[in-house]
Amino acid sequence: MTTAAEAAADGDLPLQVILGPCDDMRAEVFVRVALATTSLRTVRLEGEFFGPECRRSITLPAGASLIDLGAGEAGLLAKAVLTEPAFWTPELPNLYRLTARLVADGQAVATTTHRIGLRRSGVRGRSLWLEGRRWVPRGIARRPQSCDLAIMRDASVAAVAADPPESLLAAADETGVAIIAVAEMESGRPLDADALVERIARWAMHPSVVLAILPRAFTDAELATVAASARRLKGTMLLAAVVEAASPPPSGVPSGIDCLCVALGASGLPHDAWREAAPTVPLIAWQREGEEEKAGRSGCDRLQAAVAAWGLADGRTHQPWDWAGYVVS
């Protein structure tokens, strides 16, 4: 955990932003700075939010001050109350400018500024929801160097990226493209558990990162451990585990996992037992094409058609459950 002296020397703060109770008229936003408790006796957390700012709309900006709530086990905590908050969506990627300061004896010893989005997302039954509406992601794989966010925004698709860099996430926040972060390096090697928790904390600072897919090599116990470690860090970002479509559905879902990515093999079809599954969390169909040029919106449409036909292949007239999303990478 960083000390106040280290934060001052670095000129930056180990910041976490958590959206608290909120509705269309009021939002409580908590800001935490992870500092060693020995450095907190005379240090306060101050600052302000200002905004919203959005490329696609003009809204009268307003400010809200941070109210210092003192020190706790996880560091310094402060709260701001935003009236008539503007939440982040791909259609309206509203952002606020947060300035946070560590103040000791009336003097600022460290200051940082971030652009922050307030994203209301979650799970209802077997569906993903974003800003009060059912959200069915159609995700396509893109490498950061070849990711044209303007084209992706116009196609209403999410970008699937392995360990996405800060530059891509900041641009997606501003442009209005949802990001599905895959917890592996571009080479395909999974991130280890310690690095993954740090990445989740970093990804959660970006409203565009709606979903993080955890490594398929992790056991259920490892998934539950990562989810527990990230619980206070991830905000409303959702966590997904990977299961193999060629095997029957799992008997349970690890604690803290919000949805399952059902990885389809070469045949592109799930095990027959999935037809009778009674999933307790949303299921996302995930097929790896292997070639980026094939992983476009049309690939998602083909995947949706294929699993819909599979669901009706035994003669039934309707599927017992709906897929929550479609990802091609």
Image: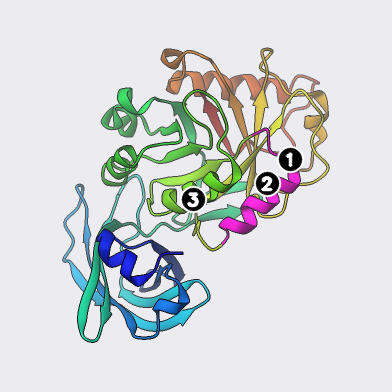
Q: Residue at x 46, y 70 (%)?
A: 20
Q: Are marks 2 and 1 in contact (CB under 8 Å)?
A: yes
Q: Secondary structure at mark 3?
A: helix
Q: Is residue 294 above or below residue 128?
A: above
Indicate which disc residue 219 carries: 1
Whether residue 152 is visible here, answered yes or no, is yes
Residue named by callout 2: 223
Q: Position of residue 279 (x, y in %)?
A: 74, 43
How far apart marks 2 and 1 lie (CA) works out to 6 Å
Residue named by callout 3: 198
Q: Is residue 306 above or below residue 44?
A: above
Q: Position of residue 57 (x, y in %)?
A: 19, 52
Whether residue 97 is visible here, answered yes or no, is no
Q: Which residue range is magenta in the image? A: 216-231
Q: Position of residue 286 (x, y in %)?
A: 59, 28
Mark 3 or 1, closer to the camera: 3
Q: Is 4 inside the magenta-drawn segment? A: no
> Mark 2 is on which residue type?
Leu
Q: Residue at x 68, y 53 (%)?
A: 225
Majority SS type along the magenta span: helix
